Amino acid sequence: MGAKRRELAWLSACVLLALVLRLHGLRWGLPEVYEEATPFRQAWEMWGWGPQKPFDLNPHFFKYPSLTIYLQFLGQGILYLLLFVTDRVRSALDFRVLYELDKTPFYLAGRAITALLGTAIVLPVFASARMISREYVEAIQIASPSKVMPLPAFESVLRARSTFPSSYVTR
């Protein structure tokens, strides 16, 4: 196996491990949510799923990074399309009723987005480590703590804003 393939294999293993650690416990505490759902709720308001609420791409909310809110917005749109295609909902009203009856699939989609963002951190950490060290083994060793640090992995389940610090750039 060539050096590039070995590097790609190790990096893939790191990313996979980071994803598994973040997806473990994704259902924890559902259907109750607390602060973690703030970006989700803001995205919900932007869609105008509620009665007498217009569609508005401006979140009018500046306490969280906008990237997180827009990704939640996109995730809700994808969830709606999936439910529509599988004939579980036929209209926005059905979607809202489903949300009111069982918020779990909605919050799981939101938490999965957060887990993916937390996992994505491994890639820039590895790239930065690769610039510092010419040996991929050392770069993997440097990037490894970002995938197994228990607090970021736990935080990726609990709140959206703590796991992807670079999203603060969009403020």
Image (cartoon, rainbow, N blue to C red):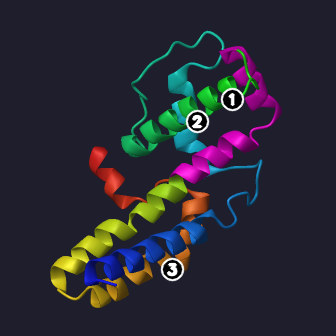
Q: CA distance from mark 1 to mark 3?
A: 34 Å
Q: Tag on residue 83?
A: 1
Is residue 47 placed above or below 54 in the rendered structure? Answer: below
Please tell me whether mark 3 sits on a helix, a strand or a loop.
Answer: helix
* Rendering coords of residue 69 (x, y %): 46, 39
The residue mark sitting in front, 1 or 3, is 1
Quadrant location of the C terminus in the rendered image: top left
Neighbor class of circle 1 (other Cα within 10 Å; few <14, some 14-19, many 20+) is some
Q: Decide: marks 1, 2 in contact (CB < 8 A)?
A: no
Q: Residue at x 39, y 25 (%)?
A: 58
Frontmost residue, 82 versus 108:
82
The residue mark sitting in front, 2 or 3, is 3
Q: Earlier in the sequence, mark 2 or mark 3?
A: 2
Is residue 76 placed above or below 35 in the rendered structure? Answer: above
Q: Residue at x 55, y 56 (%)?
A: 159
Q: CA distance from mark 2 to mark 3?
A: 29 Å
Q: Residue at x 74, y 39 (%)?
A: 103
Which range of residues does the magenta coloring cover?
91-113
Q: Earlier in the sequence, mark 1 or mark 3?
A: 1
Task: Please name the amino acid that badge 2 sits on.
Answer: Arg
User: What residue sits right under mark 2 in the picture?
Assistant: 41
Quadrant location of the N terminus in the rendered image: bottom left
User: What residue sits right under mark 3 in the picture?
Assistant: 148
* Rendering coords of residue 109 (x, y %): 62, 45
Query: Is residue 162 in sight in this rendering?
Result: no
Q: Residue at x 60, y 52 (%)?
A: 111
Task: Please name the amino acid that badge 3 sits on.
Answer: Val
* Rendering coords of residue 79 (x, y %): 61, 34
Neighbor class of circle 2 (other Cα within 10 Å; few <14, some 14-19, many 20+) is some
Task: Please name the amino acid that badge 1 sits on.
Answer: Leu
- Main SS, magenta region, reads helix
